[in-house]
Image (tube, helix red, strand yellow):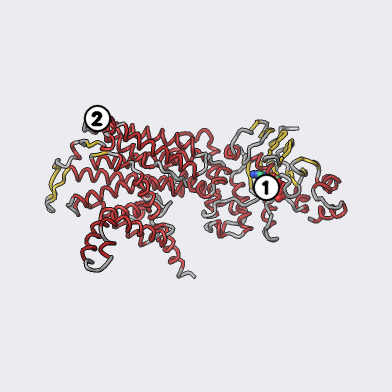
Amino acid sequence: MPTPAIETRDLTIRFGGHVAVDAVSCAFHAGTLTAIVGPNGAGKTTYFNLISGQLPATSGTVHLDAADISHLSAAARARRGIGRAFQITNLFPNLSTLENVRLATQSRARSRAGAAHGLAGTLRELTSRWDRDTAVRSRALDYLAEVNLAEKRDVPVVALSHGDKRKLEVALMMALEPHVFMFDEPTAGMSVDEVPVVLDLIKRLKARGDATILLVEHKMDVVRSLADRIVVLHNGRLVADGAPAEVIASPIVQEAYLGIAPTKAVEAALHG
Amino acid sequence: MSGIADTLLSGDLPRSRILTALLGVIVGVLALAPLLFDGAQAINTAAKICVFIVLAASYDLLLGYTGIVSFAHTMFFGLGAYGVGLALYGWGATWTSVAAGLALAIVAGLALALVIGLVSLRVKAIFYAMITLAVASAFAILAGQLSDFTGGEDGRSFRVPELLRPATLLFRLPLLNIDITGRTAAYYLVAGSAAGLFLSALRVVNSPFGRVLQAIRENEFRAEAIGFDVVTYRTLGNCLAAVMAVFAGALYALWLRYVGPDTTLSFGIMLDILLMVVIGGMGTLYGAIIGATLFILAQSYLQKLMGAAAKSTQGIPVLPDLLHPDRWLLWLGVLFVLSVYFFPAGIVGTLRSRAVTQEQLPKT
Ligand SMILES: Nc1ncnc2c1ncn2[C@@H]1O[C@H](COP(=O)(O)OP(=O)(O)OP(=O)(O)O)[C@@H](O)[C@H]1O
Ligand SMILES: [Mg+2]
């Protein structure tokens, strides 16, 4: 087995007395798509927050390409290639869609320069005109086009529909050009005709073959069609991990994930 | 022509015809002030407006662009004024003293901004505001107590380099018969530096860095999530605003040939610049020009105007009392409440959004 792109070891977070993520050890490899499922409040989003650095772990570690990144800030982890699209849309509300994505491409250009950015880079960042950086802008337009938002480039986020906001949320992550893509219920609340835009994007990403994709998704048909593997969280604990068909059929999932009678559970699992 | 404006203003044009006209008048009058007025009060007011445009713009960098509420801004203003003032007082009236005093003030200002920034930008906004309030008070008290060094509450009067002295006659404008004295030179030093500083600030807010500051103001959490170190950016924003305030203080000291707590460090000035920025329009920089000009004009001339009004209404009950020059602060207060009520986005914000709606009218 090659080195996992992302690995968590005994990752735990406690909120007061409540253990939201409980000693989760799991590895994710490049070129695979892992679906993370579990009932509401299982700790999926919190697990994501621990990996991308929005929350500090109470104990345990996060590794990126074998390097321990537990001490790094969310910003540093983003620069190292951990991308995150949030479950609750989290954008720059009064900026246009293009400016939102442009900020991400700007960040990407800066982190790509790395140490070469230096003092001269900082000076340029302070004294050059943002509207003259056509490379950053045109790359942002590409990513907007990827989620069908190119025509709405000048629309401020506050004026977007829910579905468009969800797509922009994804575009922001794509524009960072990460190695690890963390989608947290990307299609939640989207209208039926908008869902394929995001799913196709995830499929293309998967087809690229080098991306590490983590997907939290409640719709079982989506999970079935996309995932190479399913990990089940329940009460903060990892309770099942394996090939999709296997995991969905396993009694523990029918019990733990769906919390309803097994026969009904199978139906719900199969038909969403 | 428009290309030059675009370059000077870094592509951030006023975007409203009324605003453009208003700014044109203010800048035009300020640029020609020594030729237009010969009274000392008028030229003093013009110089004060230039200085406070820089100070208010630097505060807008913090408040409007970075979303930092700080009450320590006059401390940096004071540092600049004391740096240059005490250097001229102690080391003689030379340009070397000016440069050395300014350099020391910049270094001290940067260090202070860096320390306050790193220590307190991690805490909640309200605590940050309180910390800056405490530091600023401590600084003002210190300046008052170290009277051997700073002149205490009385401050220090000092001589400025020869070129800037009122008694220096530089030349005589042939046609207009106006004497160009050191006072005029001092005025243009202040006004020219103010223009340069303002345009630099405009460039910074329209730079990639400035965009990140705005992103942080909009959504700090997401700015961090896409890889920007929020604390670093804010600290740098804090430092830039501080240095700009140091420059404003230095200019003010050069103009007044005096430095003291009342002209630079008082909490009253802190409130003044807060109001200038809010009334002018936060996060626009142009708001600093409008806000500072209106505020200082009101401060300088409202009393006179009221005196005249009180006289002319003599005989009518109550009115002369209400219009007595001693009530000028009351009326200034009323003006502010009204302007904040009618222009919640500040004057610039309101003018701009009105220009946008007018532009859209023909299409719909
Ligand atoms: N910052 C926090 N402080 C306290 N409790 C928290 C915090 N964040 C999450 N929790 C708790 O941790 C548990 C897991 O929440 P989380 O959002 O991770 O669930 P989830 O699996 O993403 O659920 P959903 O499917 O509804 O999105 C919940 O009980 C939640 O209330
Ligand atoms: Mg969740």
Camera-nearest residue between A242 and B182: B182
Which x, y percent locates residue A234? 77, 44
Which x, y percent locates residue B137? 38, 39
Residues packed near mark 2 inside 10 Å, few (<14), some (14 to 19) or many (20 plus): few
Element under disc 2: helix
Q: CA distance from mark 1 to mark 2?
A: 64 Å
Q: Which residue is mark 2?
A: B90
Which x, y percent locates residue B275? 38, 52
Element under disc 1: strand
Is residue A34 something one can see in this rendering?
yes
The numbered mark 1 sits on a residue in which chain?
A: A
Mark 1 residue CB less than 8 A from any atom of ligand 2: no
Look at 74% across and 43% down and name the residue there: A34
Position of the N terminus of chain A, as image quadrant, is top right
Residues packed near mark 1 inside 10 Å, few (<14), some (14 to 19) or many (20 plus): many
Mark number for residue A183?
A: 1
Position of the C terminus of chain A, as image quadrant, is bottom right
**Amino acid at the residue labelled 2:** Gly
Evaluate if marks 1 and 2 touch, with contact meaning CB atoms under 8 Å apart.
Answer: no
Camera-nearest residue between B26 and A55: A55
A109 left or right of A209?
left
Res A145 → quadrant: bottom right
Mark 2 residue CB less than 8 A from any atom of ligand 1: no
Camera-nearest residue between B158 and B36: B158
Is residue A206 something one can see in this rendering?
no
B79 left or right of A100?
left
Look at 27% across and 48% down and name the residue there: B48
Which x, y percent locates residue A93? 54, 54
